Amino acid sequence: MERQIRDVVYDAEDTIDNCLSTTKGNSFWRRGLNPKRVSLAKEVRFLTEDKIKPMFDKAKMDFANMQIGDGSSTTTLQEPFTKVKKVQLDRQENVIGFEDEENKIITYLKEQKEELDVISIIGMPGLGKTTLASNIFRNPIIEYEFPTRIWVCISSDFRRKNVFLDILSKLTKLTDNMSSMTEEDLANTIRSHLEKKKFLIVMDDVWSAEHWDDLQVALPRRNRSKILITNRQANLVRRPNSRNHHLRFLNPEDCWKLLQFKVFGEALCPPELEDVGKSIARAGKSLEEVAMDYLEELINRNLVMVDEVRPDGKVKTCRVHDMLREFCQIKAGKNENLFQEVRKSWEGIFEPPISKHRRICLHSNVLDFFSSNLLLHLYIVLSSDFKVLPEAVSKLRNTQTLIIDTTSRTLKIKADIWKMIQLRHVKTNASIILLKSPENNQGKNLQTLANISPESCTKDVFDQACYLKKLGVRGRLTILLADNNGKFDSFGKLSSLENLKLLNDVHPNPPSEGQLPCLPPSNKFPPKLRSLTLSATFLNWEQMSVLGNLRNLEVLKLKDNAFVGECWEVEDDGFRLLRLLLIEYTNLVYWIASDHHFPNLRCLFLRNCEELEELPEELANVQSLRVIELHRTSKTATASARKIQDENLSSGGLKVYVFPPDE
């Protein structure tokens, strides 16, 4: 039964996507014989009547005959399930954590304006928009301010005439002839009633801009009244006097209070249930965090082997035994239709044939694959050598990850990746040139964007892709970091960004000609930045004080002459949380530092620092230090590392690795 349900779901997804991809404007749905429309109609009818309905009927019959209770009596479910959205306006709901939001919207509603004022409460389903609007509707201040208050539920099953009659019923007693009135007459009647009153109308669950456009013809333009809308889409109301209020998520404390009210009727949980209750109440995990939990479980069961570990102790790379890999390929490919590796044969045919697989791995000939297959439910595209990302990729709306390995220094994105609403990770070694900007909440799911060109680091991009966690920039960084253009200011608004890589590429000029004069002040950097990589920036060592003031910085990688100069004297009160420091390819000779400059340093990597005379001897007092790796450094630097190892006081022991090994 599970396999049947999964196959039907896949068929339904494919049919819906086929409909969406085939429609090109309203002409597709106009009356008349359209072969594609007829074919799709047959496909939908076959799916609903021959597949979904029989399976649903069987499931409903099995469920109806299922015993409920302790077995002493048998209860059957006779009535089918119905889903009704019902707003209870006769009682005040507990609005935990939204008190400030309620007060702010009430302030908006009390503002005196001559023209009709429209306020939208915007948020994802289940966030509490309707409950908040209900409490505002019943607030005594609002009751006093607006003698006429009307609540109307719009929802997806929108019928303009029904809504007009609903509004009219709150204004006057309905008569028999009103139900036979035209929509235009009903709108005129409503407007004539409202023009004489100061009113508040709450339109709950407005689904589209078209619904709003259909309704506003019944509203007067000027009489100091208000419309309060709850909806999921920003910029739905297109008129001058309107404003959007984005409802925030509950913080963990508010979630915990709300759970207690729902379970116990008050914020009072028995002590023995508090730990598990708080665990249930936590604001959820990202897909990546859930995947990491599963990976750690597989590692604990010795099914996956760890290759590399990150400074924070999490897995960086892993591998599986070839027998387990073969088993997973068979299970996920042939049995579950979950994953399939596709290759092009000598005959020019892609094998094996694609049916209902949801994840495809392509190693080569990707452009040829796109030209012969439009796999709408493709979730992952890997290892593709592009110089231009074609427009055809835009149609892969469910793609979650794009990893593009190319020999080109730049990659032009002709595809409108912002329409790929499921996209979470875009990563390439080239510099991404975006030819289109996002709009209307596009890019909200994006977690990784690397490597984007400095020219593409615009306010529009970062306003929409505001939940980025990893960002890479490759190109002429003077465009980005020049202190007179303010382009770097947008980085400070990336409140979720944890990992930032800045690669200075001035090709075809020599790298040294791209030297940056300075870094932006530390308060311009993203506030939660934990990992920073700089490459080929040729900064002087005095600028390290800026990075030392990044309070959450744990990983710092300085590559390819990121900093140059003979001496680095570390300033006090910096690098308090730094766990990993990598310095490679620099002309540094003297490094002056104390143990209190790096109190939490765990890993130190020095590569091709051939002029460095020695490491700071007080690093021996850093008790957290576990690893020092030296690649092609001077003999005196190696000797100082050995001395630090001998004098190190940490209980775990310090290991020093030297490459090439000592002769």
Image (cartoon, grey):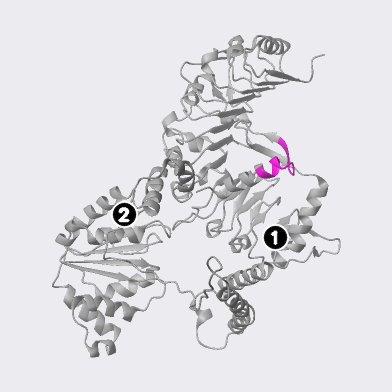
Question: Which circle marks residue 67 in the picture?
Answer: none
| Sequence-first disc among 2 and 1 | 2
Alpha-carbon neighbours of circle 1 within 10 Å: few (<14), some, or many (≥20)? some
Q: Name the residue: 40% across, 61% down.
A: 232
Quadrant of the snapshot with the C terminus = top right
Nearest the viewer among 613 and 475 is 613
Residue at disc 1, secondary structure:
loop
- Is 563 inside the magenta-drawn segment? no
Rendering quarter of residue 515 = top right
In the displayed structure, 477 sits above or below 580; it is below
In the displayed structure, 377 sits above or below 94; it is below
Image x and y of residue 37, in percent: 58, 82
Q: Amino acid at mark 1?
A: Leu
List the single residue furthest toward the right: 346
Alpha-carbon neighbours of circle 2 within 10 Å: few (<14), some, or many (≥20)? some
> Quick check: can you spot residue 575?
yes
List the single residue furthest toward the front: 72
- Is 305 inside the magenta-drawn segment? yes
Question: Which circle marks residue 338 in the picture?
Answer: 1
Which residue is labeled 2 in the image?
94
- As measured in the structure, the alpha-carbon distance from the residue carrying label 2 to the one carrying label 1 is 43 Å
Residue 512 falls left or right of residue 528: right
Magenta residues (range): 297-307
Residue at disc 2, secondary structure:
loop
Q: Name the residue: 79% across, 63% down.
A: 352
Q: Name the residue: 79% across, 49% down.
A: 324
Image x and y of residue 110, in percent: 18, 56
Quadrant of the snapshot with the N terminus = bottom right
Image x and y of residue 319, in percent: 75, 42
